[in-house]
Image (spheres, coloured by chain):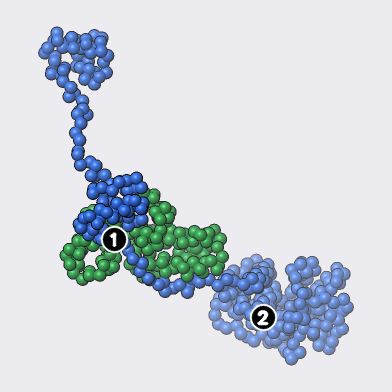
């Protein structure tokens, strides 16, 4: 340690803050004795540290706000806290007894306690007026099954429609609207006997897609006998068309198709954005029950059959889809609909599949 | 929870929930909407909510919806009960219930909700903490502060009357 006039202040600071050893401290003190002009009065004083000395606030205990627990004694200073705690039911029986004694002994505290008791909110009865709207009715399983069935059927109809829409169909004027594809069975069993064939006026090709058609598949082994009704030029032509040919060639258990116009198109297309596809007059479904499944449709190559058929007979999948939608409506008493939209040229530009729950719009891809 | 449990919850708790929200917001239509929204949330989470916890779930959901709304609408005004608010129309507050309601209305939102859950619904500190997301000790402190304010408020009015 080399203390001198140039560095003694540093050692003084170390001395005041207690960083020097006893020997070093003594050396600093010796230096100050030899150079009294350097001593600024610090040596010997004990007030260097600002923290030294204790000032006590005597009311500290009264400021504490400790919430009473089971071990807290009741005192006049914590009476209010005890009163609240008692109001909240937080006191032990012994503490409540102490509280009672204090209240009974002092009229002012009794009033205080009464005032505390007034702060408790009382249960006011308020009724919620919309409660009935919150009640939920359990959905019955059978209803859910039906919804599923309807959804599936509707989805199938949509898929068929989306798969291919052929709006550019031609329909020669004067062609009979009763078209029987079935070459192996008598299709008249499914027809409305009250209907009569009639000649259609020239029909816009696009409108044809909306014409009513019945669609069914039925198991048969033997070819149908041609009736007089079946022997019109159209039916005769159909007998040898690709639809019948495919079925024969595959030598499968025949599931004849029947596409029949049951009524003339009633010119129900009204001005507006969408044209409603008219309802079909289907025969009782029980006559065809169990005959239409997706697996069967796939198995028999319906797509190809159908493609060939519409190529020959001016029908579209949209027509079939509309028949499917109508069938669903009929079976389930629902209100599904398949509507067409047209552009300024009168061509189909899209369609809308609509139910009570949803509405799906889809444009037509006119690539074909 | 089943649908039946849900409907029982509607019968049992809709009124209480409505009272809780209405007393906090003082807006009938908004309170009705919040109650409806709360039960819709319950309906969506029907499978996940236990029957035993449904009341807590409802109040928790309603509380947070309410607080979100208050914050969104900036209705929340910081208020220190210690500063004291002098009632401006004291002369006609003769009924203690009405007086108390006004006093509760002056409380900060946290204290108001906590004291209502305590007094109206009888929830324990722990349950209130679960509903509000506060700590148990915070709940205690809020209740104590609210009581002090209510007592001072009622006392000051009674002196005027």
Q: Nearer the viewer, residue A28 or B16?
A: B16
**Does residue A57 appear in the picture of this structure?**
yes
Q: Is residue A181 above or below residue A119?
A: below
Q: Colour of chain B?
A: green
Residue B85 showing in the rendered view: no
Name the residue rendered at 63%, 67% in the picture.
A365
Mark whose residue sits in front, 2 or 1 = 1
Question: In which quadrant of the rendered view does residue A147 lie?
Answer: bottom right
Q: Mark 2 falls on what kind of element?
A: helix
Q: Secondary structure at mark 1?
A: helix
Image position, residue A215 (x, y; %): 74, 78
Q: Is residue A367 above or below residue B141?
A: below
Alpha carbons under labels 2 and 1: distance apart: 70 Å
Query: Given the image, what chain letter belongs to the residue carrying mark 1?
Result: A
Q: Which chain is blue?
A: A
Label ID, residue A330: 2
Labels 2 and 1: the sequence-earlier one: 1
Kindly identify which residue carries mark 1. Answer: A117
- Residue at the limit of the structure toward the left, as seen here: A37
Q: Quadrant of residue B154?
A: bottom left
Q: In the visual, does B87 lie left or right of A70?
A: left
Q: Nearer the viewer, residue A281 or A65?
A: A65
Quadrant (top left/top right/bottom left/bottom right) for the C terminus of chain A: bottom right
**Where's residue B12, x and y in %?**
46, 68
Chain identifier of the residue bearing label 2 in the image: A
Report if the CB atoms under discs 2 and 1 are less than 8 Å apart: no
The residue depicted at 57 percent of the width and 77 percent of the height is A274
């Amino acid at each position: 340690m080399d203390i001198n006039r140039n560095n003694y202040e540093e050692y003084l600071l170390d001395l005041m803050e207690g960083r020097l050893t006893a020997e070093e401290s003594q050396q600093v003190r010796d230096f100050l004795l030899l150079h009294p002009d350097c001593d600024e009065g610090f040596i010997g004083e004990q007030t260097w540290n600002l923290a030294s000395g204790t000032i006590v606030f005597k009311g500290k205990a009264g400021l504490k706000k400790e919430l009473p627990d089971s071990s807290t004694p009741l005192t006049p200073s914590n009476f209010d806290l005890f009163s609240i705690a008692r109001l909240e039911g937080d006191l032990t029986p012994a503490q409540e007894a102490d509280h009672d004694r204090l209240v009974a002994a002092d009229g002012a505290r009794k009033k205080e306690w009464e005032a505390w008791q007034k702060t408790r909110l009382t249960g006011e009865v308020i009724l919620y007026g919309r409660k009935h709207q919150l009640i939920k009715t359990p959905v019955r399983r059978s209803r859910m099954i039906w919804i599923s069935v309807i959804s599936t059927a509707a989805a199938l109809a949509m898929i068929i429609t989306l798969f291919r829409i052929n709006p550019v169909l031609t329909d020669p004027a004067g062609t009979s609207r009763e078209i029987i594809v079935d070459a192996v069975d008598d299709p008249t069993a499914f027809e409305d006997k009250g209907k009569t064939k009639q000649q259609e006026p020239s029909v816009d090709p696009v409108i044809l897609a909306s014409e009513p058609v019945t669609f069914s598949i039925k198991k048969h082994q033997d070819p149908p006998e041609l009736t007089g009704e079946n022997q019109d030029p159209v039916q005769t032509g159909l007998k040898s068309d690709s639809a019948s040919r495919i079925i024969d060639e595959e030598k499968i258990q025949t599931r004849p198709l029947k596409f029949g116009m049951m009524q003339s198109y009633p010119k129900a297309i009204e001005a507006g954005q969408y044209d409603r596809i008219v309802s079909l007059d289907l025969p009782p479904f029980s006559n065809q029950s169990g005959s239409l499944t997706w697996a069967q449709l796939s198995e028999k190559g319906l797509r190809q059959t159908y493609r060939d058929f519409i190529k020959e007979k001016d029908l579209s999948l949209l027509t079939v889809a509309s028949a499917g939608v109508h069938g669903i409506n009929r079976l389930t008493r629902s209100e599904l609909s398949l509507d067409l939209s047209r552009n300024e040229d009168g061509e189909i530009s899209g369609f809308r599949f609509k139910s009570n729950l949803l509405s799906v719009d889809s444009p037509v891809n006119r690539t074909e | 929870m089943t649908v039946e449990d849900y409907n029982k919850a509607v019968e049992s708790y809709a009124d209480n929930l409505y009272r809780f929200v209405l007393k906090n917001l003082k807006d009938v239509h908004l309170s009705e909407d919040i109650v409806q929204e709360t039960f819709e949330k319950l309906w969506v989470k029907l499978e996940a909510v236990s029957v035993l916890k449904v009341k807590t779930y409802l109040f928790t959901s309603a509380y947070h919806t309410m607080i979100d709304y208050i914050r969104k609408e900036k209705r929340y005004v910081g208020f220190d009960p210690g500063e004291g608010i002098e009632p401006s129309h004291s002369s006609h507050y003769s009924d203690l219930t009405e007086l108390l309601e006004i006093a509760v209305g002056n409380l900060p939102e946290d204290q108001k909700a906590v004291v209502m859950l305590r007094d109206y619904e009888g929830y324990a500190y722990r349950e209130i903490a679960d509903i509000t997301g506060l700590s148990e000790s915070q709940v205690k402190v809020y209740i104590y502060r609210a009581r002090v304010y209510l007592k001072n408020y009622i006392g000051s009015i009674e002196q005027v009357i």
